[in-house]
């Protein structure tokens, strides 16, 4: 008997809390030293308790793993380390029964060089897949397209000695770009989407979508042909698969990113990349301006769309969407050791970025949770896990989830040496100090705080659905704003300073209403015509629900 | 069509409407089907209510609500015929249980069952009982799921399932109601406890060994099918005890934060929230939790009936205030046991409050001992943690969870009953503070 475990809810993603899982690093269900779907199923009760609405899976497909699985060698399978397609189906069913949805990473732009399509294309240029990739006799074309992985790639073209031609790749040279000018490629990728949607998946995080097409004289990003194809994908999803979500990864400026929403007919969600580094910048400078400014320059989006908000994820803290000055500032403040830099970014987890300061971690979560958008948490950050900057590439932020203080951090029963990566062991962030088990039992732990915080946010759909109205004040260290949805009016006030701060807010349009603090439900003095005075602790924040006076 | 404000008023005045403290901002019918087109016309509708925060619930409405018995007859007859009715957005399927004899006969007398809150039940001829679920959630209702399972696995101490009806369509898929055998002449376990406590306390005690056995057998059956993923027992994950601790701890914190200062019934535990939380930490510091299985979910004397020669277990819906996903979760069987133990404490106090007689000294202790003896003799020991100490400790955790939940409930609804959970919490505090 197939059950439907959700109400019809085409906007569910607007109220959802997302949780990004690195399957390899989450829990090892078969004792081989790497996480898998069986392990993930065992931890669903934990994620349900935490309040997660939707799990985002990092790439789960067969892959040579030269780019964390973003180099897909078979779009229709599951990497054997993670299990089988049946394990995946079981996982989705188990998640659904707990009210949790599942989306997965999907790379549309390119494949692994190991993919049979590419092998066929390079060995049989005149065959049916001969032009499924972008081939050229020289490396002269599309010079205006920037190289993204500046640390490893000298060019977007690489010579293939087998075919005797150059192939185009916007990322690593082992990841040739698919040729979307070929209608067969367009259809083949739609088939990939249909395959997983038919298995019950609730959507995709579309990796690297801006780069699907190449055109001479352009930078090859955000081209109209790319948008046209995304509209086609969306139409297919809307017609056959209700309540699914397409989440675009487009690391671009807000004005460019909003194009991925189209008129509500492309992607349902897109990450708001530029706001993320500005939250860190604001905290460092003790100045709310960077947050106000980036939100002011963020265009309105269609009502059926939503921003994805995050503090940290599986990639480096990307600094592509900041000015050069801002980037220098961020490097100086947050990447004191050059090892911490990667490409145009900083490869660190949340807690070490903030020097482990609990106040700072809570403040940034409060700001993120208060903004219009759906928060996306990164596994391990809910226990303020650390990183290992001595590991290569992005492995430093992909170490095993720290479940207990026992052997292998409770992540695996395999031999220590067999683990895909060893869990952290340093005295501050090591698994004996930082783990789920200990934090569950300590009422004052960050995990327990975040759990209550998620529950609070979910009681108020306004955070996902409501309007955002910035609220200026006489104090530049204060980030304050109003969220409104139906009859719910929420006032959020955050102190970015390391010192206590007073602030006077003009709330006269809410005169007569009573601010009720949302955690303790304490009523504050009613709002009058005069400026409303609040005093905030260092890095402190208040969320109030404005209620009509009884 | 009924307009929005009429619909809101209509729903708000229904006895089963649960969110009385919330302000309804919007209401709309999301689907409806006609049950009877000739006069008198009957219909069934799904209505969405949106609250002022933007959250919403979906309720099942019967039209007209004043003629519940007439509508209920129509629902039973649709089950008998196995009808499928088409709505605008989905279908309502009515299904009989094959071989259920009670469906063959004509329905004559109908009556309601009195003290209900979240559902609507109608009893026909003391033979059948129809239960209509009002607040709907997507997925199969555990009442139907568990009853069907227990029926298929030949657990005798239930009232047999006769049929059900459910909706599936665009808005959601949900169980709308079930039809069950009515235990004729059965005595409600709670009423029986009070009556016998007042008249012949030993008599009731003598029934409890058997209740323990039936409970143990129920758990054995619920854990008996490895091939059904919804029921097969699970080994709890390492953090299962931690999740339980965290959940109960937050409940304690919430309830104690809001504890009134001036209620003398509360004074034995007032200001002792931290002590209670310490106690919880002590009890959950280490130890195994046994297997996790599907349980009754809301087990107390009011969910049992004495049917002349044996106990019958009723109402597998789980605690109505919890979400369906939570109610379907596998848990330790001891959670049910703790619920029943708390029920004995309630009976011992309620007999003074309601019948004006005090129970004999140590009645509650004896009730607990007899019930547990029957339970432990019968239950599959592999479902429980190993050893008496571990069982007692886990039982205390669940009793604490239950008592804290009761405390909140009584403070909100029945202030004169507050003393019962207060004594329960006090007892747990003192038991653990007194060296053995």
Image (cartoon, coloured by chain):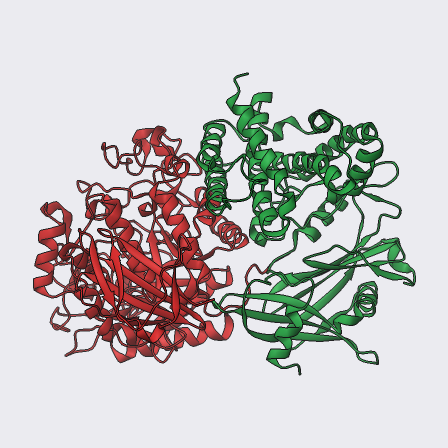
Chain colours: A red, B green
Residue toward you, B3 or A20: B3
* Residue B107 in sight: yes
Residue toward you, B384 or B371: B371
At which x and y percent is residue B51? 52, 68
Q: Quadrant of residue A413?
A: top left
Question: Residue at point 56% right, 49% down?
Answer: B326
At which x and y percent is residue B314? 75, 46
Residue B399 shown left or right of residue A503 in the figure = right
Where is the N terminus of chain B found, in terms of image quarters?
bottom right
Residue A134 shown left or right of residue A99 in the figure = left
Residue B55 shown left or right of residue A329 in the figure = right
Residue toward you, B313 or A134: B313
Q: Quadrant of residue A210?
A: bottom left
Numbered label tally: 0
At which x and y percent is residue A313? 28, 53
Where is the C terminus of chain B found, in terms of image quarters?
top right
At which x and y percent is residue B167? 67, 66
């Amino acid at each position: 008997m197939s059950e439907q475990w959700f109400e019809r809810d085409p906007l569910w993603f607007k109220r959802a809390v997302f949780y990004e899982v690195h399957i390899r690093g989450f829990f090892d269900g078969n004792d081989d030293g790497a996480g898998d779907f069986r392990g993930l199923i065992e931890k669903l009760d934990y994620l349900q308790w935490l309040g997660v609405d939707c799990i985002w899976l990092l790439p789960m497909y067969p892959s040579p793993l030269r780019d964390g699985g973003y180099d897909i060698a078979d779009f229709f399978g599951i990497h054997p380390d993670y299990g089988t397609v049946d394990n995946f189906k079981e996982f989705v069913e188990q998640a659904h029964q707990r009210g949790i949805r599942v989306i997965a990473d999907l790379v549309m732009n390119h494949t692994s060089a190991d993919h049979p399509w590419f092998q066929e294309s390079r060995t049989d240029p005149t065959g049916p897949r001969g032009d499924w990739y972008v081939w050229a006799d020289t490396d002269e074309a599309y010079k205006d397209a920037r190289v993204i992985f500046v640390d490893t790639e000298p060019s977007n073209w690489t010579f293939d000695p087998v075919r005797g031609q150059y192939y185009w790749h916007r990322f690593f040279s082992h990841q040739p770009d698919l040729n979307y000018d070929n209608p067969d490629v367009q259809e083949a990728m739609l088939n990939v989407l249909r395959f997983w949607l038919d298995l019950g998946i609730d959507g995709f995080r579309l990796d690297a979508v801006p780069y699907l097409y190449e055109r001479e004289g352009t930078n090859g990003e955000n081209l109209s042909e790319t948008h046209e194809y995304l509209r086609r994908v969306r139409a297919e999803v809307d017609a056959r698969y209700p309540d699914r979500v397409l989440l675009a990864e487009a690391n671009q400026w807000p004005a460019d990113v909003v194009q991925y929403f189209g008129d509500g007919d492309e992607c349902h969600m897109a990450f708001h990349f530029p706001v993320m580094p500005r939250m860190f910048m604001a905290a460092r400078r003790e100045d709310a301006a960077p947050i106000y400014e980036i939100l002011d320059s963020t265009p309105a989006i269609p009502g059926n769309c939503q921003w994805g908000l995050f503090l940290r994820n599986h990639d480096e803290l990307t600094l592509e969407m900041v000015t050069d000055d801002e980037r220098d500032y961020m490097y100086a403040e947050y990447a004191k050791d050059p090892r911490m830099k990667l490409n145009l970014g900083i490869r660190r987890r949340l807690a070490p970025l903030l020097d482990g300061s609990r106040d700072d971690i809570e403040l940034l979560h409060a700001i993120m949770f208060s903004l219009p958008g759906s928060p996306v948490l990164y596994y391990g950050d809910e226990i303020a896990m650390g990183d290992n900057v001595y590991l290569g590439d992005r492995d430093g932020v992909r170490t095993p989830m720290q479940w207990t203080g026992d052997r292998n951090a409770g992540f695996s029963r395999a031999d220590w040496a067999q683990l895909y990566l060893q869990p952290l062991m340093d005295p501050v962030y090591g698994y004996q100090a930082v783990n789920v088990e200990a934090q569950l039992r300590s009422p004052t732990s960050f995990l327990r705080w975040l759990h209550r915080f998620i529950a609070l946010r979910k009681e108020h759909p306004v955070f996902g659905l409501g309007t955002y109205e910035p609220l200026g004040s006489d104090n530049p260290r204060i980030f304050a704003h109003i969220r409104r949805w139906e009859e719910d009016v929420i006032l959020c006030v955050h102190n970015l300073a390391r010192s206590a701060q007073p602030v006077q807010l003009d709330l006269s349009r809410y005169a007569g209403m009573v601010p009720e603090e949302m955690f303790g439900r304490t009523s504050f003095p009613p709002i009058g015509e005069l400026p409303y005075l609040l005093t905030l602790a260092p890095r402190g924040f208040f969320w109030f629900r404005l209620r009509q006076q009884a | 069509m009924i307009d929005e404000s009429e619909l809101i008023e209509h729903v708000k005045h229904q006895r089963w409407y649960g969110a009385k403290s919330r302000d309804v901002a919007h209401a709309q019918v999301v689907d409806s089907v006609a049950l009877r087109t000739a006069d008198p016309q009957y219909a069934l509708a799904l209505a969405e209510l949106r609250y002022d925060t933007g959250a919403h619930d979906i309720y099942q409405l019967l039209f007209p609500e004043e003629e519940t018995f007439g509508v209920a007859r129509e629902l039973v007859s649709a089950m008998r015929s196995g009808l499928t009715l088409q709505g605008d957005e989905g279908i309502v399927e009515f299904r009989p249980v094959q071989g259920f004899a009670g469906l063959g006969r004509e329905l004559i007398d109908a009556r309601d069952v009195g003290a209900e809150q979240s559902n609507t039940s109608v009893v026909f001829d003391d033979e059948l009982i129809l239960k209509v679920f009002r607040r709907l959630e997507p997925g199969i209702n555990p009442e139907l799921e568990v009853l069907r399972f227990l029926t298929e696995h030949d657990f005798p101490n239930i009232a047999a399932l006769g049929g059900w009806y459910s909706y599936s369509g665009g808005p959601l898929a949900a169980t709308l109601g079930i039809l069950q055998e009515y235990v004729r002449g059965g005595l409600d376990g709670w009423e029986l406890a009070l009556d016998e406590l007042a008249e012949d306390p030993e008599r009731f005690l003598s029934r409890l060994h058997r209740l323990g056995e039936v409970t143990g057998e129920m758990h054995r059956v619920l854990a008996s099918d490895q091939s059904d993923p919804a029921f097969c027992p699970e080994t709890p994950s390492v953090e299962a005890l931690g999740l339980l601790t965290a959940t109960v701890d937050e409940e304690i914190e919430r309830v104690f934060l809001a504890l009134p200062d001036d209620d003398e019934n509360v004074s034995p535990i007032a200001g002792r929230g931290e002590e209670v939380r310490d106690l919880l930490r002590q009890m959950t510091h280490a130890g195994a939790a046994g297997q996790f299985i599907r349980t009754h979910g809301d087990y107390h004397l009011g969910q049992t009936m004495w049917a002349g020669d044996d106990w019958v277990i009723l109402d597998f819906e789980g605690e109505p205030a919890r979400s369906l996903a939570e109610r379907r979760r596998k848990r330790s069987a001891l959670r049910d046991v703790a619920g029943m133990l708390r029920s004995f404490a309630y009976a011992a106090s309620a007999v003074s409050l309601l019948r004006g007689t005090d129970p004999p000294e140590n009645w509650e202790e004896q009730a607990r001992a007899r019930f547990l003896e029957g339970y432990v003799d019968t239950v599959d020991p592999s479902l429980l943690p190993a050893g008496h100490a571990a069982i007692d400790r886990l039982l205390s955790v669940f009793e604490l969870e239950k008592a804290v939940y009761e405390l909140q409930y009584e403070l909100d609804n029945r202030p004169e009953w507050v003393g019962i959970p207060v004594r329960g919490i006090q007892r747990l505090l003192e038991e653990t503070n007194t060296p053995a």
